[in-house]
Image: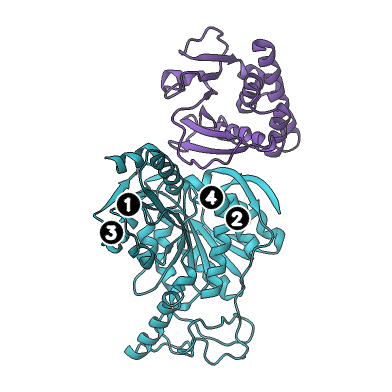
Chain colours: A cyan, B purple
Amino acid sequence: MKVEFMQGNQACAKGAIKAGCRFFAGYPITPSTEIAEAMARELPKVGGYYIQMEDEIGSIAAVIGASWGGLKAMTATSGPGFSLMQENIGFAYMTETPCVVVDIQRGGPSTGQPTMASQGDMMQCRWGSHGDYEVIALAPSSVQEMYDFTIMAFNYAEKYRIPVFVMADEIVGHMREKVILHDNIEIINRKKPEEKPCKKPYPFDKLIPEMPVFGEGYNVHITGLTHDERGYPDVSPETHDKLVRRIVNKIRKNKDEIIKWEGENLDAEIVFVCYGSPSRTVKHAVRNLREKGLDVGYIRLITVYPFPDDLLKKLKAKKVVVPEMNLGQIYYEVERVCKKAEEVILVDKIGGELHRPEELERAVLG
Amino acid sequence: MIEIRFHGRGGQGAVTAAQILAKAAFYDGKFCQAFPFFGVERRGAPVMAFTRIDDKKITLRCQIYEPDYVIVQDATLLESVNVVEGLKKDGAVVINTVKDDLDLGYKTYTIDATGIALDVLGVPIVNTAMVGAFAGVTGIVSIESVKKAILDTFKGKLGEKNAKAAEVAYNEMLKKYG
């Protein structure tokens, strides 16, 4: 176990390499560029590959190709690049390609605020590509979690054969803190089919099929078109239903295993629901409000998606408070689920700064 | 918890200074964090950076609005930026200037960091000298840890020169303010 002082983006790169990532394709974009820089430096040392692509569309395409070549692969970007990736992210869902996309969110829309923090891409990460699919998205709130959650993202990607998002922001990306580089972390690797050639790479009766590798004699066909069990195009209603339901169900049926959160005093009258950087401010505000005699708790979403409907439905709180560095995104998910609450309050913040504890306390005290 | 805000201009290394100070605290066995706040990514544009140092785990992530110390790398910022905004009543300013009689309404420690940088480095990049000066005047971090953090950040001859600049500034502050 090593203890180092490092930047969040560097911790992300360290976590990726620890998880077994051996391919990175990306295009420099503030505030994520340090991840690319670190990967360019470190990947060759472990026999990996770094490639700077012509744009973010090419980057995610290269990542998908590398994954089918048998390597754990990732890219890192920010809002504008994430927008460009959405079509190929859909392709990765349809072809069940494990990969990791790290989004160091910045102020938008458009070019927006390149150097400022935001949580403006949270709905895009859930609904950014077309069609039906389920998402796994993690939201780190510290430099330590940039390391830990990147490893977790690769594990989820490999286990469920899915693109996984690490939805960070400029604050944790550029923050420098102490990081414990654990040794005893479980690393999950993909399973390959035993059969060569592989006659049914996409079996309808297997929730998560093993993943063939190009160049190893599996002789499989990959397409973004609706495909049958052999991987060949078949756009019939029956095949589409079977395929897409399976792709969706591999997450829905495992959501209890995937969803991660932390919290305190969930039976309180006032409960904060938070994720990412604002979570740290929430913990301060909760402590201060308790000292003032208020019955306050919090739930901090580690995985923002799959969204923890069942957990939030159990809340008895009269007041649910959702702080976000946007004008309301996850707030609407919370509002949809927390029907028992008398009010669901959004504490929005845009412009690049993180909430201060006093702002959250004011939202509760009125 | 001790909170420090750095003021500089793009290209002067304020962000690196905050990082070096935090890393020095890390080497001294303290909890610490450092982070930047840019307006635009442009040389010469005003930049802020922040460092927090504590004996226990730091959970806050928001910007520093009420610092204990302000470190000003470029005195020309006084014309356009309220560098003492939010500074605690008993807070202090460490500023790079040749003037000794600067009245900012707070305890003010002055140092000619530009002169030191030109002497030692041959260029007017003052960030490492300012961290050394801060260590000398406050004792919050040791000069040994500052030098170690600098040598981590800059390799070879460049690292040695920057460590020297920090040490010269440190000693000058000890002599000046005891």
**Is tag 3's residue or tag 2's residue first in the polypeptide sequence?**
2
User: Which residue, given by chain and number where applicable, does mark 1 sit on?
Assistant: A269
User: Which residue, given by chain and number where applicable, does mark 3 sit on?
Assistant: A335
**Is tag 2's residue or tag 1's residue first in the polypeptide sequence?**
2
* The C terminus of chain A: image quadrant: top left
Q: Nearer the viewer, mark 2 or mark 4?
A: 2
Point out residue A137 in the picture as x, y percentages from the top left corner: 45, 63
Q: How many marks?
A: 4
A110 or A154, nearer to the observer: A154
Report the side of A275 relative to A68 (left or right): left
Disc 2 to disc 4, C-alpha distance? 11 Å
- Quadrant position of residue A288: top left
Q: Which residue is found at the position 48% from the left and 41% from the top?
A: B61
Q: Amino acid under label 4?
A: Thr
SS at mark 4? helix
Disc 2 to disc 1, C-alpha distance? 41 Å
Q: Nearer the viewer, mark 1 or mark 3?
A: 1
Up the image or down, A159 lies above or below B162; here it is: below
**Is tag 3's residue or tag 4's residue first in the polypeptide sequence?**
4
Disc 4 to disc 1, C-alpha distance? 43 Å
Q: Chain of mark 1?
A: A
**Which residue reaches farthest top?**
B101
The verdict on a common chain for dots 4 and 1 is: yes
User: Which residue, given by chain and number where applicable, does mark 4 sit on?
Assistant: A33
Up the image or down, A334 lies above or below A352; here it is: below
Q: Chain of mark 3?
A: A
A224 or B87, nearer to the observer: B87
SS at mark 3? helix
Q: Which residue is found at the position 52% from the left and 64% from the top?
A: A100
